[in-house]
Image: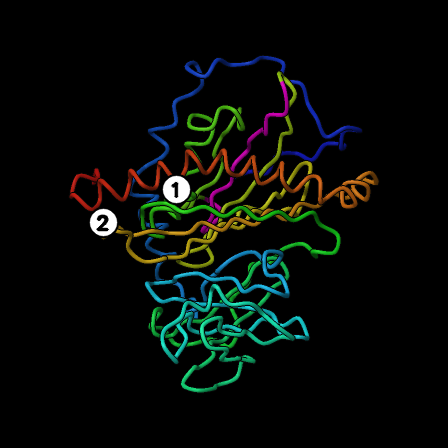
Amino acid sequence: MNPRPSTPRARLPLSIRRRAVPWDRQQPTWREARPGLIREALKRAQALPTGNWYVVGSSAALRGDRPLARTVGNQEVVIWRGTDGRPHAGPGICPHLGAPLADSPVRCGRLVCHWHGLALDGTPYAGWEPLPAYDDGALLWVRLDAVGGEQPLDAPAVPVRPALARAVTAVYEGVGVCEPEDVVANRLDPWHGAWFHPYSFVDLKVVGSPGGDDGADQFTVDVSFKVAGRLVVPVRAVFTAPGPRTVVMRITEGEGLGSVVETHATPLGPDEHGRPRTAVTEAVVAVSDRPGFAFVRRAAPLLRPAMRTAAARLWRDDLAYAERRWQLRSTGRFPG
């Protein structure tokens, strides 16, 4: 893969498409999106270690007075902040008489069971044992050795991302009837972008994939993000899978250089019909070296809802994609 020649950066990040190609006349990508290529990339990702760490939610969602709860691998987990702001985590079932600790308030850094007042400060007490927790500034993680079954690591392998202090960050969360591998497989198929999401992406071309001349285990994509009409933002992005439940997209050329989108898939446990459920937690960490980005950072509280809405629109379709994949796999009808 030969990189595109560098060009002077435009005064504005937007470009005008000279020729708008109708959706049904764009170049088909089904020949390039080889099932075996995607399958092997997924297989390599699944072999990578995680240290039994799972993303359980957004850092911003964890307030000082309420816990955050998640079922991971059919295990109830609760997480809250101590008086120093650090997260504490442990089983979500009260060891006394089984109350749901997710419904209990936090008082002075202690989680107080609302059934009988058992107060937990994050250390072992009355049969309750804590779980390792980690706050990376954007996302919350909990280590579940009984669920992961791997060699534990002291901390999760957080993907390299821009400094949060100079970025605008937004986190989307959704749930689908599928398994984590179905979410990761979706992200390791960049060829579907302009076909499946024409409202967001145009002029998409995969210019590098695993097994290419550069030897990198990554997918490199030239794509334009739609703004309005013929206005677009063209970028080059690289997709990698640093773990079995994580895919990272990083902008390597164009506007927002260095920005990342982290997609994490967390197994929740079966639904009432016994089907697997997976939570998608996606963190967008956007940066720019343009002088006006300082104003954008100040306006971040107003921008985050729009960023989450955009992510939700994409994941409405992509979770349907992942659910369809799981349905076919579970009934032995998935191609190949």
- Tell me the quarter of the image containing the C terminus: top left
* Residue 186 numbered mark, or none: 1
Viewer-nearest of labels 1 and 2? 2
Q: Sequence order check: which comes first, mark 1 or mark 2? A: 1
Q: Is residue 218 within the magenta segment?
A: yes
Q: Position of residue 38 (x, y in %)?
A: 35, 44
Residue 188 placement: quadrant? top left
Residue at the (36%, 69%) spot, across then down: 148
**In the picture shown, does residue 169 fall above or below 336?**
below
Question: Residue placed at 69% from the left, 56% from the top?
Answer: 164
- The image quadrant of residue 8 is top right
Could you tell me which residue is drawn at 64 percent across and 61 percent down?
A: 137
Above or below residue 326? Residue 270 is: below
Question: Magenta residues?
Answer: 213-228
> Which residue is the extreme one toward the right?
291
Numbered circle sitting on residue 273: 2
Q: Which colour style is shown? A: rainbow
Q: Is residue 210 left or right of residue 311?
A: left
Identify which residue, 121 or 11, lies in the foreground.
121
Secondary structure under tag 2 reads loop
Under mark 1, the amino acid is: Asn
